[in-house]
Image (tube, rainbow, N blue to C red):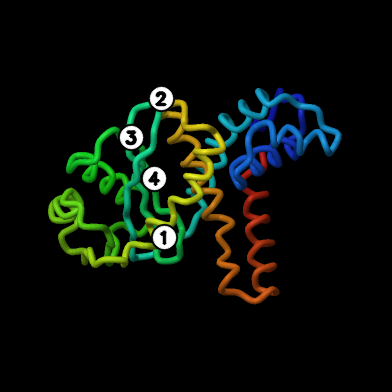
Amino acid sequence: MSIYKRHRFSSDVIQFAVWSYFKFSLSLRDVEDLLAQRGIEVSRESIRAWCRKFGRIYQKRLRSNAEASGDRWFIDEVFISIKGERHYLWRAVDQDGDVVDVLVQRRRDTKAAKRFFRRLLASSKQGQPRAIVTDKLGSYSVAHRDLIPDTAHDTRQYCNNRSESSHQPTRVRERQMRRFKSRHQAQHLLNVHSAVYNLFNIQRHLCSAALTRWRRDRAFASWKTVTTG
């Protein structure tokens, strides 16, 4: 049975709306305007429902079809505000800048670090990494010692800049949304955003124009595959 059954709009419209919302820092109203410019009248609440339903489906398919992440993980955490309460966004990226996983938690302690490490190991197709890079937070050292002691652990200053800079798109989206409304909403959005980001992370600054176009076409072809009903 098609995942688009009983939806008034075509699958192409839904795919474009969901892709636009998670690929770019756009609000629901922005996506509504993009569709209106194309002669498609749809409310932002419908777009919200599409992003909630199909974003989850697309994200699972993208993760299932994704290649194994790199063997060197850069791990960092930043605080985010949810309804005036401080939470922490834990993120790991590999040496290519692809997101390994993200997790929103209330705490920034050893228990939280171990929970994130277990999630990383469970979600990674390659299993244990060759090396991890973190800051000097003590919780990382304990989680490393207890869960992946055979993995090299680098805590030198400036070595974790790759992970720290990876939070920038999240900050942009957080401002666009005027803060996250709930932990569940933040986790869902960041899960889908990371999967879409990885697919279209074509490293254009390292490629020729021809190679960039080829990688982009391949990404669009993969997107079409995972969004087909």
Q: Amino acid at mark 2?
A: Lys
Relative to residue 46, is residue 187 drawn left or right? Answer: left
Quadrant in the rendering for residue 31: top right
Residue nearest the observer in this picture, 12 or 186 = 186
Q: Quadrant of residue 5?
A: top right
Reading the image, the residue beneath label 3 is 87
* Residue position marked by numbered label 2 in the rendering: 83
Name the residue at 72% across, 24% down: 43
For marks 3 and 1, the one nearer the N-term is 1
Q: Amino acid at mark 4?
A: Val
Residue linked to disc 1: 69
At which x and y percent is residue 168?
47, 51
Residue at 31% of width from left, 36% of height from top? 105
| Residue 123 position within the rendered picture, expressed as x and y whole percent measured from the top left | 36, 48
Q: CA distance from mark 1 to mark 2?
A: 33 Å
| SS type, badge 3 | strand
196 in relation to 42, above or below: below
